[in-house]
Amino acid sequence: MPLPEAFMQELKARNDIAEVVASYVNLRHSGRTYVGLCPFHMEKTPSFNVYSDNGSFYCFGCGAGGDVITFIRRIENLDYMEAVRFLAQRAGIPVPENNVDDGMRRLKARILEINREAARFFYATLNSKEGAEGMEYLRRRALTPQTIRHFGLGWAPASRYSLTRYLAQKGFTQEEMVLANVAFKGRSGQIIDRFASRVMFPIIDLRGNVVAFGGRILTDAKPKYLNTSDTPVFNKGNFLFALNFAKNNANGQLILCEGYMDVISMHQAGFTNAVATLGTALTPSQARLMAHYATEVVLSYDADEAGQKATSRAIPILRDAGLLVKVLTIAGGKDPDEYLRTNGKNGYIKFKQLLEACGNDVEYRLQKIRQSSNLQSAQGRVAYLTGASTVLSTLENEVEQEVYAGKLAEETGVERSAIMQLVKRESEKRKKNRERKEFKAFQQQLAGIRDSINPEKAQNLRAASAEEALIAYIVQYPENAKDILERLPSEKFITAFNRRVYRTIMDRMKDEKAISLTDISEDFSVEEISSISKILAKFHDVSVTKKDAQEYIDVIEQEYEKIRIEKAKSAEPQDIQEYLQKLRSQKK
């Protein structure tokens, strides 16, 4: 059942979209709108717009858009009702739960309960005779009982039915266990434990819920690490291991590691601002998440080739999230965990010295190019400067470019002005490539080629454009909605998505009252609401008259007739006779 209208109106009134967004994004006033850097994609130039007058937002860069509920859904990774509760709590108003269809909420709550019980089971098993193998491994890694308890580490027994039997005794169904991804169905149809003979690492969200697990095998079997797949409460690209602890100890800086053990060892050594990705390469979402709690990230990946490649991939992602980036390099190819254990009691001091001495990402990238170039030869110096100019061209700050160009000039004996010419040439090349891609994407967007929400738009561009304009007009002038509906029934809309939007708006519009995205957001997915927000943003500053609206109606009717005629041409004789008979009966 939909939420009561009175509650939704109060929720909107108490959660002004500009105020809510401003708690996540730095906004500046621009005419009737607010503008800022989009929190949903990496950008240097603000393309994220907030429209207080209609309670919506839209990013012209990535296409994210919607109302205040959609914004919270996206940025906090919540479903619709979770976002409503989040905003209700922010405003201090109770949610009328009895009127809510909360099936998904109950499912998520059950999955979180399963994860909590599973974590208790794994921890208890680790501290029993059955977990001796896992406990021995953790002790070899020099972890203390306090650290093991702090992170809730556990052991998944060898039996493939231990956890499922335990959870069944706790009242959980097989379907719930499979949805939580702690079990899967075998060929016989019987459910089997997903994790067996593995050291278990619970993954905990910022609210203290166990949302997933990582499991490490102690043999040479593959995969070495097995992680929970995506579930209704977990998406690995949106979480960071130990951020629930690190966020309170960041003090402006986070240390990003490769694995669970690196993070745990660092926390035990006193570096409680360490986090790690969850078995995948760093994602933009994770970088933006770190930017909520820090201004600087120190990359402390393994020193092997894979770790160095991961470092190179992570640098632009972190920079694009607005973070300062430093790169920590450990001599001898050791990973942070190994380095701390090797240095024993001196581990903290020595690692702290490494942290204080580590250079920024620009110095790291220049050093990598320098290592592969022979500066004693003219050809080597050219190769070094060519690669270095590409690195410097990625810097937005010209002063920063000048500083590094000066250092390069001292190193190579080449004039700084000549190096800056190379840098500017590379910068222009990058700019042109970016503009070319943006223009191509813009052309495709106009033609509806890449519109996955309204795939019919590309083949019906004239009709779809008129439909969108009419939808925007109705939202702007609700007092004319009844008249428009009488002239244009929803059946005449050509594209199915726009037809659905039109019907929903008309159904929700009562007594010619204004309607906002919040009034309809429950009926659409986040991506669909973004498309509707795009329509409203496109016409936000466009003055549309009644005459324009009539023209939109005429276009839709013309396109409708064209399609009807085309269908008639290819119709069977019997269908045509039935159609003519229908017309005659209508005339009578």
Image (spheres, rainbow, N blue to C red):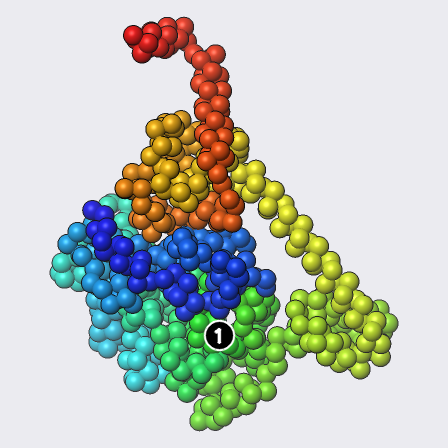
Locate residue 103 relative to residue 39 in the image: left or right. Answer: left
The single residue placed furthest to the right in the displayed view is 378
Examine the rendering and report whether any part of residue 196 can be seen: no
Against 419, is 482 above or below?
above
Residue highlighted by disc 1: 256
Residue 287's x, y, as percent?
A: 49, 67
Given residues 266 and 409, the one toward you in this image is 409
Whether 543 is drawn above or below 488: the answer is below
Question: In the rendered picture of this protein, how many numbered marks are placed on residues?
Answer: 1
The image shows residue 253 at horizontal and vertical percentages of 48, 80
Amino acid type for the residue under numbered disc 1: Leu
Please report the residue visible at 17 percent of the width from the left and 62 percent of the height from the top. 166
Q: Nearer the viewer, residue 163 or 324?
A: 324
Residue 341 location, quadrant? bottom left
Q: Quadrant of the C terminus?
A: top left
Relative horizontal placement of residue 87, taking residue 4 as reference (left or right): right
Residue 27 appears anywhere in the view: yes
- Residue drawn where x is 84% and y is 71% of the image: 418
- Where residue 408 sits, quadrant-wise, is bottom right
Question: Residue placed at 49% from the left, 33% from the top?
Answer: 547
- Residue sitting nearer the eye, 191 or 76: 76
Q: Is residue 121 left or right of residue 17?
A: left
Q: Secondary structure at mark 1?
A: strand
- x then y, percent, for residue 167: 18, 61
Please, is residue 368 above or below residue 340 in the view?
above
- Where residue 227 appears, x then y in whole percent? 37, 62
Residue at the spot x=59%, y=64% of the render? Answer: 44
Q: Residues within 10 Å of mark 1 (few under 14, many from 20)?
A: many
